[in-house]
Image (cartoon, rainbow, N blue to C red):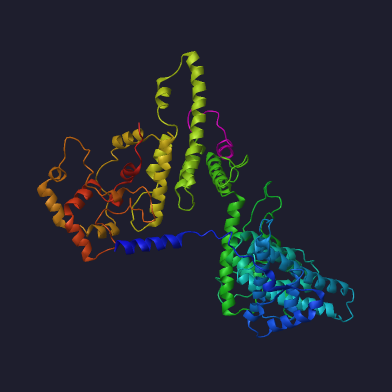
Amino acid sequence: IGAYFSSILAEKLKLNTFQDTGKKKPQINAKDNYWLVTPRSQGAIHSWFTELAGNKHLTVLAKKVPILSKKEDIFGYLAKYSVPLLRATWLVKTTCAYYAAISEAKIKKRQSTDPNIEWTQILTKYLRDQLVKIADFYHANSSQCNNPLVVTQDMEQAVKHWEYNEKLAFYMFQEGLLERHEYLTWMLEVLEKVHPLDDELLKILLPLVLQHSEEFVQSAYLSRRLAYFCSRRLSALLSDCASPATAHISAASPNTTGPVVSSVHLPCADFQACPQHRPLVYGLSCMLQTITLCCPSALVWNYSTNESKNTNPGSPLDLLQVAPSSLPMPGGNSPFNQQVRAKIYEVEQQIKQRGQAVEVRWSFDKCQESAAGVTISRVLHTLEVLDRHCFDRLDSSNSLDSLYHKIFCTNQNKDSQEVPPSDEAVVSLLCEWAVSCKRTGKHRAMVVAKLLEKKQLEIEAERCSESEVLDEKESISSTSLAGSSLPIFQNILLRFLDSQAPFLSDPYNEHEKTEFLNLVFLFCEFIRHDIFSHDAYMCTLISRGDLSTSNRSHSPSLEALDDHYPKELSVKLEEQGLGDQMEIDSGTAHLFDDIEKNDFKTDFGSEFPIFSPVSGDCHHNHSPSLHRRVSASSEKSVKHEIIFPSTYELVRHLQYATHFPIPLM
């Protein structure tokens, strides 16, 4: 058996060992499967693409794949022979593999580029060229209003190549062969450059944008740019046909009885019968309504700052005479359209509320004349600074010092003997930011600890300078000396633990466990940086009587957990006595010898074993094996339960005192 097991281990080691085959790697001969297209080989390439567009097997065609002199020429041949999209994508992949093999075979290798980005740029360049040809045709014939347009052969070819490669691009986009953000950004840039009078060009681009509407709404930045474009074009179209009396029309409330009638029906009545403008109005309205429903953040009113001069201030809806819920929809006032309009109207109200909150900087004290207004403004400013700071990089403008100056140096208080109310609110916000599960990152606790440590050192330095001046005048009071024994933020942090800090109450709440873990980590950093005194904290709890052993009232979930403990165990404990069970010696060194070490895992996994109920207290397993396990180790489990009651049953500060680390002297 030993020899057999050794052979298995040897085979496993052999399979898991990475074989360095760099020197033995066979050189790829591109001539075996590829052939470069020359002007003389037009007949051969014609027959090859004809077979590719037909039903010939790809394994046969892969033996000799043509390589064109320019990569973008491949899209022209694919459109010329109307190759099926699946087989066309195969040719693009094969061509990409050829260039990758050539680059690897070169002695002097260059930095490899992402093939997705490269082919996205090639395809978008080809599409742009076809679009330019189409635009030139319409511009050349724009002066001939009365004469019918004569479609040239170049125009027909450009339209054919555009329509085919547009479908190919969508297929490659869905297959993940194109760089999504690059392609969507190109599409938006082309749309924004369309002249206001180029309605024909806009009619070509709108179906392409609507086809990718689901992808656009995934980005608030792209959705906002697209919403601005749609609002400008719709505003121009509606202003041409709307009278001054109907220029500003509010959205109809969905609570009105009867079907919701579009309030923009009258000014847009001309568009309903106009084949030239009806597709534009419907397309732009549909895109704007989609953004309203799926990405309302893109429509929220925003203020302009010096840092963002290029961004559009305000809201895209400011440019529109009507609300999105009042824009025309295909199908008239059908019941389904009424439901959609009601949902759009509901989102519009949320956008208005969010815009008003942004306008007053989320502070009801708009003028910020009162102390509460100043405090609210500082808290909101601090939260914005924390969310904008990039913690993954370090430079002169993005460091911990710059973060500290943005948070604490914006409103310096000359009297540093006491922490001002605005600073107290900022400290509480920093603690909430480090603990909340609505933000991520283990770095938060260390960042907050370093910020408060820096602030504490600054206040202590100012206190020392003031005490030296008082010492010269021999007027130092005993109260000032007594007050300096505690850390500066001790009382603020204690109030945070009293009312705002999370504690464990529900074993089934994972967010609660995560926030409690973050709290323990945060105060570990506070204690390590001497921002929070553990000794003073314990003295305060003892003096207030917060360390009482009386547990909180049981919740229904905790009552279900208690059913696992047989009553006979408690009776047996009372009969034998707690001291006899533990066999206490002269000291308490052996008190925890029998306690399972698994309950003190330092690695907090997803199951949070340190916060879970004690052994035999699991609420997920009601099988008889659990009761057998409890009865087999009844004395150990009872001793464990008496020493460590379930964490969820303890009062708030007893949970903190149990999990906060004791500093080493």
* Residue 569, image quadrant: bottom left
Q: Nearer the viewer, residue 69 or 276?
A: 69
Where residue 443 appears, as percent x and y from the top left, is 49, 45
Give the vertical position of 40 relative to 437 (above or below): below
Q: Residue furthest left?
A: 575
Say whether residue 233 is left or right of residue 446: right
Task: Check the picture and name the quadrant holding the C terminus.
Answer: top left
In the image, residue 407 lies in the stretch drawn in magenta: yes
Give the vertical position of 249 relative to 314 (above or below): below
Task: Check the picture and name the quadrant holding the N terminus.
Answer: bottom left
Q: Nearer the viewer, residue 301 or 554?
A: 554
In this view of the protein, can residue 96 be seen by the observer?
yes
Where residue 166 appears, as percent x and y from the top left, is 70, 74
Q: Nearer the viewer, residue 291 or 2?
A: 2
In this view of the protein, can residue 263 be seen by the observer?
no
* Residue 547, image quadrant: top left
Q: Measuring 32% from the left and 62% from the top, which residue is drawn there? A: 3
* Residue 607, image quadrant: bottom left
Where residue 420 appears, as percent x and y from the top left, is 50, 34
Q: How many marks?
A: 0
Q: Measuring 41% from the left and 41% from the top, which residue is drawn there? A: 523
Where residue 273 appears, as percent x and y from the top left, is 74, 81
Say whether residue 399 is left or right of residue 205: left
Say whether residue 410 is left or right of residue 52: left
Residue bounds of the magenta highlight? 400-419
Q: Residue furthest bottom?
A: 55
In the image, residue 241 lies in the stretch drawn in magenta: no
